[in-house]
Amino acid sequence: MKIHINPKYEHLRDEIIDAVKGNYVATEVFCNKRNIVEKFSMQGKEYVIKIYKQPNLINRIAYTYFRKSKAQRAYMYAGRLLELGIDTPQPVAYIESKKKGLFSTGYFISEYLPYKLMRDAYNEIQDSEKRRLTKDFIDFTLEMHSKKVLPLDFNSNNIFYHFDEKSGYYRFALTDINRMQFDKTPSTSEVMRSFEQLGVNVEGLYKLAVYYCSQKGSDVEYSIFIFLFHRIGSRIRSRFKQRIKEKKEAMLL
């Protein structure tokens, strides 16, 4: 078993090892599907553990010899984001286990952020605040892109928000960060595809795209065309996948 602990949290080594063995009490379950994400406590402070599903054989070989695991990337990318001034939960540790000499499962432990999900934002805040939230979110996105950072899973389940009383602005933080693009300014196509992942309706996406382009000085009409292109393409891909799924199910009957 490979155990890498952030030096700031070395005093938690025994508790971290126990957590990987499953010896902890989950106080909240955020996800229990493909991966498991749970909140738990160590020495009176709250943390989050993410247990990645064991990959297929090809990826087990890849993570053993050729590629960094999702857990290691999440840990590394968290440190890099924080260095760039982009908020994300503090990385505590990543752990990798093996079976028969091959990578088996990855674990990523981070501090717990008591923020709310962007997924629920527009149902939780007053109408008078929605415009400011949108503006602050686009400003956050612009700043992130100016630092040559592009999250590849930019959906509203992976973005936290809270209102900072001191500054008077909404602040944002990224989670589920094992898929990131660094050191390259995102193209218009990449930005519009990223907005498509947010899961908001067409009108909301249109407003996001227009404000983003107006602030950045991009060609609004071209950006909207790219946005619509990705929107239509996404729907076609979704329908195609659904038809394939239905055919597979029919064959099993």
Image (cartoon, helix red, strand yellow):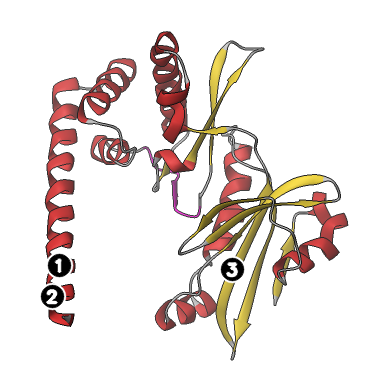
Q: Secondary structure at mark 3?
A: strand
Q: Nearer the viewer, residue 10 or 114?
A: 114
Residue 37 rendering spot, x and y as whole percentages: 57, 56
Query: Do the CB atoms of the residues marked 2 and 3 lie less than 8 Å apart?
Result: no
At mark 1, the secondary structure is: helix
Judged left or right of residue 42, residue 171 is: left
Determine which quarter of the picture holds residue 191: top left
The type of residue carrying mark 3 is: Gly
Q: Which residue is mark 2?
A: 250
Q: CA distance from mark 3 to mark 1?
A: 33 Å
Q: Considering only vertical position in the picture, is 117 above or below 7?
A: above
Mark 2 element type: helix
Q: Is residue 141 left or right of residue 9?
A: left
- Which residue occupies 40% across, 81% down? 58
User: Which span is picked out in magenta?
Assistant: 178-185
- Which quadrant, please, contains the C terminus? bottom left
Q: Which mark is residue 106?
A: 3
Q: Amino acid at mark 1?
A: Glu
Q: Residues within 10 Å of mark 3 (few under 14, many from 20)?
A: many
N-terminal label among 3 and 1: 3
Image mark for residue 108: none
Residue 156 left/right relative to 15: left
Residue under circle 1? 246
Q: Earlier in the sequence, mark 2 or mark 3?
A: 3
